[in-house]
Image: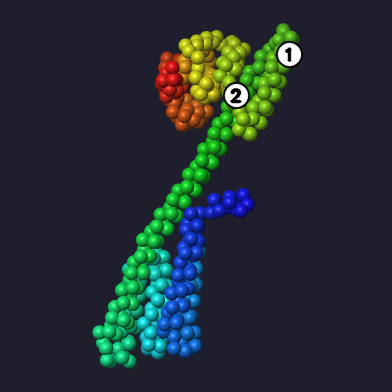
Amino acid sequence: MSPAHTASEDAEPAQGRLRKLNLTLFLPVLVVSGALVVVKDARSWWDALVLGAGVVAVLVAFVRWTAGDVLRVALPCLVVTAAVWPFSVLVVDGSAAFFGISSVGAFVIPQLSRRRGMAVVALAAYVAAVGATRLLVAHEDIPGVLLQYVLIPTGITLALVGLRFPNKRFYDIVTELEEAREREAELAVIRERVRFASDLHDIQGHTLHVVKLKTALAQKLVDSDTERAKQELREIHALVSDTITQTKELAYAQRRLNLSAELENARNLFEAAGIGVRIKREADVDPGAGELLGQVLRETTTNILRHAQATRVRITLSESSITIVNDGAQRTPLPELRGLAALEQRVAADGGELTVGQDNGQFLTAAAFPHRRSGTQEKR
């Protein structure tokens, strides 16, 4: 078996596999049962032809049922089997041909969208009524006729139809599970796209703001300090090159943020913007939390440069958390920061908590991963 064939089978819906399993298991049973009906009741080739037509109708209905569209052939199959049953009772003197109308009815009725109860009653009544017509040509053994042509066929018909309803419910549950799995897969794709968009925003949005800041600084220095202006331009070039590299790495799922590099980058940016920065390390950062903490720092740095008139920034690092406080926040209601909102979801998904607050002109951004801290302590 080729790998491609295996992948195709894995991708096939469970409902389709179950229907194919039914086709493999029960089609031979129906063929044998139909053959026994013909052999038992047929007295001539003409009888065999008519009874065989009923068997063929059953097989067609079953095959279409396994394909999930039995209603498309329901009417012709019901008409054929409904005609074979009275032919068997009145002409052939056979009591087994109810097999056709009972089987087709059992395939069709559970698939109806409404009035299924009425359909069951009508099917049972038809089987019983046709069987009772045997009394018109056989008067010697009325109890035997009623048992053989009415009670047994009607009881078996009701049993077959009744068994199909749990089967239908089972297939409905399988279908619902498949749909739920498909929705989950679609949501996973959407979440991945949102994550990608968030990372792309982190990379390019941050870079564009830094380039804007450094360009403005280079313009101021171009006349008074040419060498410093050239240095700023070289840093802009290096920053853009690094951003291109990070974008490629993001596209190939290879990007990893380095918290130490982000700290140094934030320090340089703040100092270039004339903002005093103080970094306090209370403990070594857990490697597992470092990447998300670096993303929080990068996004917060961008927000401070874009939205605040900051003069001081304080960054505090612990084993599994980061706290960033800056002054110069607007004394207005907390602004909507979409980058932090998206990042909050990612932090929460990793078992952490992102806190954003504003008070007396100060803006606080904090992220913590308590489970990483407790996990590290247990290892120690």
* Residue at x 49%, y 88% (from the top left corner): 45
Q: Which residue is mark 1?
A: 230
Q: Relative to the observer, which residue lies in front, 166 or 140?
A: 140
The answer, for residue 119, to whether it is visible in the render is: yes
SS for dot 1: helix
Q: For residue 379, which quarter of the picture?
A: top left
- Image location of residue 107, percent across then percent down: 42, 68
Neighbour class for label 2 at 10 Å: few (<14), some, many (≥20)? many
Position of residue 115 in the picture relative to residue 233 (left or right): left
Q: Which residue is mark 2?
A: 206
Q: Relative to the observer, which residue lies in front, 324 or 283?
A: 283
Residue, far left:
143
Above/below status of 279 relative to 21: above
* Residue at x 31%, y 81% (from the top left corner): 148
Neighbour class for label 1 at 10 Å: few (<14), some, many (≥20)? some
Viewport quadrant of the C terminus: top left
The answer, for residue 358, to whether it is visible in the render is: no
Q: Of the residues shown, which amino acid type is indicated by label 1?
A: Lys
SS for dot 2: helix
Above/below status of 118 relative to 129: above
